[in-house]
Image (cartoon, rainbow, N blue to C red):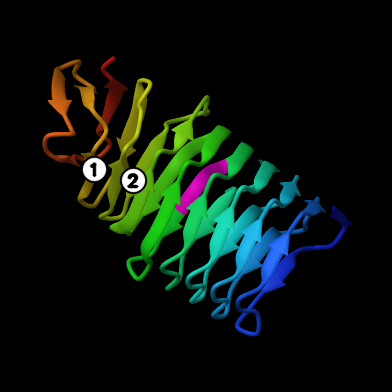
Amino acid sequence: MILLYIPTLIFDMRYFENNIHNNSILQAAKYGIQMTKGATENTVMHNNVIDSTKYGICVYNNGTGNMIIENSIVRAGGHAICVYDKSSGNEIKSNSINGAAGYGIYVTDSDVNNNTFMGNQIRMAKVGISVSNNTGSVFTQNNIGVVKDSEYFISGNSTVRLANTSFSSDQIRAADGGQNSISISDSGKVDIRNKAGNKTTFDTNKSIYSAVLPDRESITIRTVE
């Protein structure tokens, strides 16, 4: 393992089809690892990003087809993992997030599409997963433990698409302004309760559950055993 006391690891359009493995990045000044300026088809795996002052791992500015797998992010000063700015077709899988002052996973921008977030573990973030101005991301089998606010937060005319997901009284909260919606599929029977306390049971294996959340509305979802 390489122990790096450096401001950040930066991979741009000159970096493609590389393997970035087994580094420990401590107290990065801004980003722990950033993939930007067309960084393409790189694999970022088994890295530890600890106490970054802003973000843990970010893909932005046309980062495409990258794989971010089995990394550990601890105590991010902002968001732990973020994808934005024309970055599409990335796979973010089986990462462990333990502490983030912002969001565990943050996806934003309408030109960010076909990114897959699967099997990530999120603990002690302000919000588990946040989607803003985005409809083209899929979240599958992610596990959100204790967070400071809500498990999911959607804003800016977004849709959070959840598949094959287990819920433990998880809260999905919408921001003020815009039309924000949720979609749940292949996740078994779930109890869905709104802020007024009204409950609906829905079998997402039989059909996709979808709903639009009004401004500042929230629902709580629990998997039915």
Q: Which mark is residue 19?
A: none
For the residues labelled 2 and 1, the Cα–Cα distance comes to: 9 Å
Q: Position of residue 115 (x, y in %)?
A: 40, 60
Label 1 CA crowd tier, 10 Å (few <14, some 14–19, many 20+): some
Q: What residue lies at 52% left-to-right and 28% top-to-bottom? A: 148
Q: Of helix, strand and loop, which one carries label 2? A: strand
Q: Relative to residue 96, is residue 21 drawn left or right?
A: right
Going from the N terminus, do you reach mark 2 or mark 1 first? Answer: 2
Q: Which is nearer the eye, 96 or 186? A: 186
Kind of residue sitting beneath label 1: Ile
Q: Residue furthest bottom?
A: 14
Residue denoted by label 1: 182
Q: Position of residue 181 (x, y in %)?
A: 22, 45
Q: Relative to residue 82, is residue 188 drawn left or right?
A: left
* Location of residue 15 by image quarter: bottom right
Kind of residue sitting beneath label 2: Ile
Q: Of helix, strand and loop, which one carries label 1? A: strand
Do the CB atoms of the residues marked 2 and 1 lie less than 8 Å apart?
A: yes
Label 2 CA crowd tier, 10 Å (few <14, some 14–19, many 20+): many
* Location of residue 217 by image quarter: top left
Q: What residue lies at 41% left-to-right and 59% top-to-bottom? A: 108
- The verdict on residue 202 being magenta is no
Q: Relative to residue 48, is residue 81 drawn left or right?
A: left
Residue denoted by label 2: 154
- The verdict on residue 103 being magenta is yes
Q: How many marks?
A: 2
Residue segment shown in magenta = 102-106
Q: Position of residue 123 (x, y in %)?
A: 57, 31
Q: What residue lies at 71% left-to-right and 59% top-to-bottom? A: 30
